């Protein structure tokens, strides 16, 4: 069942087109993550769904009803802001009840909802405090609580973890995932952090320059990036890209035949580089320039015989040093081939 | 003159943070200088207060700050020194000042909210006009305003002194509030929009409650400037029973002339007293206001 | 695509209604109390309006008379410029000196700061002008003190046309507090490590003041100078009270604003006074423009 659909949605600021015709439909209960580099339009898209930015063209519908010109508060959505945007002069309780009071909900019902949300988020003891008396993590919970009390069909999150420290970020990430499982509402989540995207999403939408580059499950996107941009953006450390000229000497299955003189890009993720002789595709010798020992992994940075850089992630602790030479290659199944226009060639 | 003097963005000086950087001699010298300056600055003020408590015979024979035989006689004489009691004049001043504060704070906050938070056609143009009026001397509008109020029959009433303030004519306060409102995160407005608020409710429930510092600053300065104002009441008020305390005091100078300095000092002290009390209570607010916005007084 | 066009028209819809609703008071004030009067004032300056009969167009006659045939205008200009050129630099020097002394990390900073600020806060009131009248009178506080200390019989400083203006300069300098607060805040903005670097480079305190403090403080000095100068051009109350509204003795304290007031509200020469007002506005505008032009050469901005 579709709860939200975008049809050729556009956003222009004057002559500048920020969102250039996005089509997307999101089903009920789905956790969708918009990801992309800064300036890709992901936040703008979210704010258009929220009703904070007017839609310049195309259609937004929620539950089958056109929502382009519906007031933000009437769309059945709630939003968690990057800075939390808690009202500094109101108590935690009041922060959560304010929207319901504006909607003139009966006091008893407001109280019931606030207390229930506080319980879910374990912030009941904080209800009478002011936001400035809370830690970053607690503020985050209040911001989510303010969304929960409205009982929305759709939750919107705008980079909600970016103001937390690394440890709290991981912890909160798990809690948001759990919240999604418990409530079952649709959630749309914006981030520039591809790890957050991979870990939270049912479906990732990769945006660049106002266009959806690809959408699909995290593993789909990891395994079959639609183009070179997506391939480089998802996965850490970044995928290696090697220029290869000439025929498809690797014998990868491709969607079309390849011209003899065509310039192609071969993509191999660092964790998929095979050392030793077992590789199906031989990439030659890698001259090691620098090695990072992470304990659980060893990362080696080097150059191939033709000077192109290549990075390798190896499991465990390996005895490699700068100056060493390492025979490297890859298995055909984990190689990606991109045409000069960036599009994926192998099927 | 649309260009505004660029107020340097300044932090409020914290308490002494450079202790120990100056040598003991230099510090002693600095203290001596500061204490001397304090004395010279305050001496006339304290002497005025002391003289108001002296019998008249003593005033011109004593430079000391302690009256030998303190008496409130001068206050009694001064209080009833005009054909109208000073009590009436203080009430007049208070009424005008309170109305001006109300008018300034309400209308300037509304304008600043429109300029900072609402998108409407012509906003940039009107904002530029507002900045343009910031440095426009009052003299450019003084005479036509007077003629207009004269024709409206408003001269010799408090209307010319108060009504304009409800129309945000003190661009300085608009500017002050614009600066402050800009520092309130826009995400709060957006959160309020998500919570179903329209512009009015955002203004009343989010922006105003968060702006108490700037509203207080505007209130206190507005009150003090109005209380102290001499020029506008001088032009617009004719009947002595409508006078402000400042105007009454100046009339008292004419009538008491050189004859009753004691009463004159007593009434002078009283007219300064409200400002002094505000100064004591809101000292920090006033100094921050000066330091961060560069107000002239 | 009519549907899309309609959608985009609605998408750029703004809060025109709310915007003008909130702006309404200011807008009325601007149109009725600023823009209209500015235009009217310019028109009046070209008439002989007196409030009694309809204004007669006289062209630039008022301006011609001011420029060529008005000795009191010349006096008022002389008095005002003397006052501005004396009081502003003295006030700023004093404010800067005290601010630098206060910035030595002394205990009691907030006490001194508050005490020094008090005169600026109350200095414009009638009460202080009354006090000044007494202090500098023939039998006033100053002469009593001079007599007690040195046995010197001073004249009446207020009644003497050669000294009366200087008592007003002194009153202006007495109100150095707000400039000082701004200087102090500016001094606090200068990062301590710059001084540390200068010390390591061997710069002595005096050299540090002229090579670091002063250049880095130029934006604040500029700001204070412009504000205080405009304010000084507009000074009125103290001169009015001290001279009983005459600008005397023999016009020695005839501030420009005082002359303007007399012409408009004592002599009811509204047309002529409007011309005087426009000249004042022009002077302030030219001064401000020159300040901004000169700022390029001596004010140091970080950005």
Image (cartoon, coloured by chain):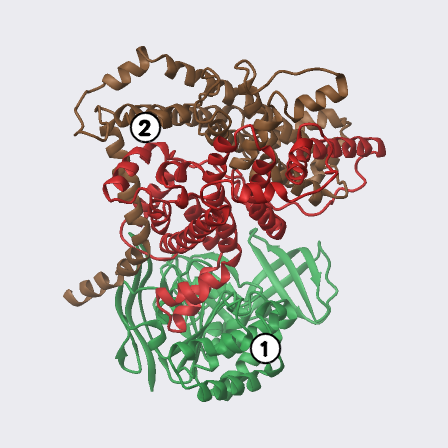
**Secondary structure beneath disc 2?**
helix
Relative to B293, residue C198 above or below:
above
Measured as percent of width and height from the top left, residue B190 is found at: 42, 66
User: Chain C colour?
Assistant: brown
Residue B83 seen: yes
Measured as percent of width and height from the top left, residue A21 is found at: 29, 65
Query: Residue A34 occupies which quadrant of the picture?
Result: bottom left
Chain ID, mark 1: A
Chain ID, mark 2: C
**Secondary structure beneath disc 1?**
loop
Q: Which residue is mark 1?
A: A128
Return the residue nearer the eye: C205 or A266. Answer: C205
Query: Residue B264 occupies which quadrant of the picture?
Result: top right
Tell me the crowding category of disc 1: few under 14, some 14 to 19, or many 20 or more residues within 10 angstroms, Cα based.
few
Measured as percent of width and height from the top left, residue A329 is found at: 58, 66
Residue at (34% x, 77% y) in the render: A75
- Residue C264 shows which numbered tag? 2
Residue C227 seen: no
According to the colouring, which chain is green? A
């Amino acid at each position: 069942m579709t709860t939200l659909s975008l049809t050729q949605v556009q956003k222009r600021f004057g002559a500048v087109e920020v969102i250039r015709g996005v089509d997307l439909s999101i089903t009920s209960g789905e956790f969708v993550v918009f990801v992309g580099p800064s300036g890709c339009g992901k936040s703008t898209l979210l704010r258009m769904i929220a009703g904070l930015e007017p839609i310049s063209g195309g259609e937004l519908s929620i539950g089958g009803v056109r929502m382009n010109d519906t007031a933000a508060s009437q769309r059945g959505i709630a939003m968690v802001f990057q800075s939390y945007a808690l009202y500094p002069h109101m108590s935690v309780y009041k922060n959560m009840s304010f929207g319901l009071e504006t909607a003139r909900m009966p006091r008893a019902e407001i109280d019931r909802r606030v207390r229930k949300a506080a319980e879910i988020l374990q912030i009941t003891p904080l209800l009478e405090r002011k936001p400035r008396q809370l830690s970053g993590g607690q503020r985050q919970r209040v911001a989510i609580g303010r969304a929960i009390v409205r009982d929305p069909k759709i939750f919107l999150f705008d980079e909600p973890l970016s103001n937390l420290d690394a440890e709290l970020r991981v912890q909160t990430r798990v809690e948001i995932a759990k919240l999604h499982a418990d409530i079952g509402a649709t959630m749309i989540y914006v981030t520039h952090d591809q790890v957050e995207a991979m870990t939270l999403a049912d479906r990732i939408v990769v945006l660049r320059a106002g266009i959806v580059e690809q959408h699909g499950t995290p593993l789909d996107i990891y395994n079959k990036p639609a183009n070179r941009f997506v391939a480089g953006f998802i996965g850490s450390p970044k995928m290696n890209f090697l220029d290869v000229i000439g025929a498809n000497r690797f014998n990868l299955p491709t969607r079309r035949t390849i011209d003899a003189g065509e310039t192609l890009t071969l993509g191999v993720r660092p964790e998929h580089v095979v050392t030793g002789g077992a590789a199906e595709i031989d990439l030659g010798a890698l001259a090691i320039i620098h090695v990072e020992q992470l304990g659980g992994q060893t990362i080696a940075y080097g150059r191939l015989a033709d000077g192109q850089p290549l990075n390798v992630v190896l499991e465990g602790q390996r005895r490699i040093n700068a100056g060493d030479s390492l025979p490297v290659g890859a298995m055909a199944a984990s190689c990606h081939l991109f045409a000069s226009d960036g599009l994926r060639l192998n099927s | 003159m649309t260009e505004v003097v660029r107020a340097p963005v300044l932090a409020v000086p914290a308490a002494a943070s450079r202790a120990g950087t100056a040598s003991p001699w230099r510090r002693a010298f600095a203290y001596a200088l500061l204490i001397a300056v304090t004395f010279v600055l305050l001496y006339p003020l304290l002497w005025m207060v002391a003289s108001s408590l002296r019998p008249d015979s003593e005033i011109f024979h004593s430079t000391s700050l302690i009256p030998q035989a303190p008496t409130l006689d001068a206050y009694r004489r001064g209080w009833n020194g005009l054909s109208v009691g000073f009590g009436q004049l203080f009430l007049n001043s208070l009424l005008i000042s309170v109305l001006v504060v109300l008018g300034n704070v309400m209308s300037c906050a509304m304008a600043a909210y429109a300029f900072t938070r609402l998108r409407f056609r012509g906003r940039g143009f009107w904002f530029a006009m507002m900045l343009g009026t910031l440095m426009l001397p009052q003299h450019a509008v003084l005479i036509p305003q007077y003629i207009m109020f004269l024709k409206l029959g408003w001269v010799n009433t408090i209307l010319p002194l108060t009504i304009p303030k409800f129309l945000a004519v003190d661009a300085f306060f608009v500017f002050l509030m614009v600066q402050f409102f800009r520092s309130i995160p826009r995400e709060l407005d957006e959160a309020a929009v998500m919570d179903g608020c329209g512009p009015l409710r955002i203004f009343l429930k989010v922006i105003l409650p968060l702006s108490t510092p700037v509203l207080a600053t505007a209130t206190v300065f507005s009150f003090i400037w109005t209380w102290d104002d001499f020029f506008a009441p001088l032009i617009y008020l004719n009947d002595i029973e409508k006078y402000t305390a400042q105007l009454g005091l100046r009339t008292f100078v004419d009538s008491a002339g050189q004859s009753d300095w004691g009463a004159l000092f007593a009434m002078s002290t009283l007219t300064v007293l409200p400002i002094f009390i505000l100064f004591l209570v809101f000292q920090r607010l006033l100094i921050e206001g000066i330091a961060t916005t560069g107000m002239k007084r | 695509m009519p549907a899309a066009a309609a959608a985009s028209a609605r998408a750029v819809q703004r809060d025109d209604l709310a915007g003008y609703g909130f702006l309404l008071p200011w807008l009325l004030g601007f149109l009725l109390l600023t823009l209209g009067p500015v235009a009217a004032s310019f028109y009046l300056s070209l008439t002989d309006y007196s409030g009694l009969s309809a204004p007669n167009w006289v062209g630039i006659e008022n301006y011609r008379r001011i420029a060529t045939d008005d000795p009191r205008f010349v006096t008022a200009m002389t008095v005002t410029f003397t006052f501005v050129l004396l009081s502003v630099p003295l006030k700023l020097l004093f404010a800067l000196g005290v601010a630098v002394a206060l910035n030595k990390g002394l205990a009691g900073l907030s006490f001194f700061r508050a005490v020094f600020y008090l005169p600026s806060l109350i200095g414009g009131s009638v009460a202080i002008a009354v006090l000044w009248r007494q202090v500098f009178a023939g039998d006033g506080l100053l002469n009593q003190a001079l007599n007690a200390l040195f046995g010197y019989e001073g004249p009446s400083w207020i009644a003497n046309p050669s000294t009366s203006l200087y008592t007003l300069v002194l009153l202006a300098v007495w109100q150095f507090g707000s400039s000082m607060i701004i200087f102090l805040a500016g001094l606090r903005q200068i990062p301590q490590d710059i001084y540390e670097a200068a010390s390591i480079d061997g710069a002595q305190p005096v050299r540090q003041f002229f090579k670091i403090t002063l250049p880095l403080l130029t934006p604040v000095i500029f700001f204070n100078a412009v504000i205080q100068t405009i304010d000084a051009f507009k000074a009125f109350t103290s001169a009015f009270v001290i001279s009983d509204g005459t600008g005397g003795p023999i016009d020695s304290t005839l501030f420009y604003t005082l002359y303007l007031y007399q012409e408009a509200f004592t002599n009811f020469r509204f047309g002529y006074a409007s011309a005087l007002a426009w000249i004042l506005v022009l002077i302030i505008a030219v001064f401000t423009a020159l300040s901004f032009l000169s700022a390029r050469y001596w004010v140091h901005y970080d950005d």
